[in-house]
Image (cartoon, helix red, strand yellow):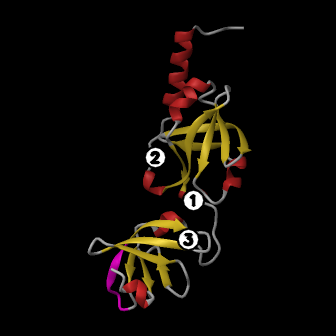
């Protein structure tokens, strides 16, 4: 059995990492998680899921973590986290370097949605228009309230606009056109 010296092992590990660096167009990526703290002593990392489809992690073989393509050796579900171990980071101390990085997949790998459903990342950035086409603002965030989502928008005058994600209020979402048409209840519309 051949054993690498610690310095040679580090060079070999750096070589592995260099090979997995990739030039990726990040505009066509979907964020599905964020690397949290290390878990245990065997290089597993806690992943904070940023997707409604956490079951997707069980079948994944590789994922972009920051700007590195990493290969998944194991996947476990633990409380609200997903524990992933990456082949390129077999040691806890090395894996800890990944903390804070985002996990992304190509948009083509996004889980298909039902008719009338939209990804949060598609909603953020949409222009908000009223029924006559007047611009009211731009969606900056999607708040999950339990009963229904609320689109948090910034009005053209800088004030905040909260839009309940209800069919009675949101009349049309046109992701390709970059806008949504709303019919706001009068008290919401006059609240600014």
Kindly state the secondary structure of the residue where label 1 is placed. helix
**In the displayed structure, would residue 31 be above or below residue 92?**
below
Left or right: residue 40 compared with residue 183: right
Mark found first going from the N terminus, 3 or 2:
2
Image position, residue 53 (x, y; %): 66, 58
| Residues shaded magenta | 132-138
Residue 7: image tag: none
**In the displayed structure, would residue 133 be above or below residue 50?**
below
For the residue pair 137 and 24, the one nearer the viewer reads as 137
Q: Identify the residue position indicated by label 2 in the image.
A: 24
Kindly state the secondary structure of the residue where label 2 is placed. loop
Residue visible at 59% across and 44% down? Answer: 63
Mark found first going from the N terminus, 3 or 1:
1
Residue 107 sits in quarter: bottom right
Q: Identify the residue position indicated by label 3 in the image.
A: 118
Q: Identify the residue position indicated by label 1 in the image.
A: 108
């Amino acid at each position: 059995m051949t054993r690498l010296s610690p310095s040679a092992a580090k060079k070999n590990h750096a070589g592995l990492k260099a090979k997995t660096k990739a030039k990726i167009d990040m505009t066509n990526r979907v964020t599905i998680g964020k690397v949290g703290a290390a878990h245990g002593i065997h290089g597993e990392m806690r992943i904070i899921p940023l997707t409604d489809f956490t079951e997707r992690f069980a079948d994944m073989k590789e994922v972009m973590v920051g700007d590195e393509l990493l290969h998944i050796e194991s996947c476990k579900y633990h409380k609200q986290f997903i524990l992933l171990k990456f082949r390129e980071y077999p040691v806890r101390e090395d894996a800890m370097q990944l903390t804070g990085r985002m996990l992304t997949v190509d948009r083509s790998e996004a889980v298909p949605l039902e008719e009338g459903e939209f990804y949060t990342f598609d909603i953020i950035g949409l222009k908000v228009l009223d029924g006559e086409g007047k611009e009211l603002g731009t969606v900056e965030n999607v708040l999950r309230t339990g009963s229904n989502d609320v689109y948090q928008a910034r009005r053209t005058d800088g004030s905040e606009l909260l839009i309940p994600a209800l069919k009675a209020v949101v009349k049309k979402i046109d992701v390709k056109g970059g806008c949504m048409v709303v019919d706001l209840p009068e008290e919401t519309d006059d609240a600014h």
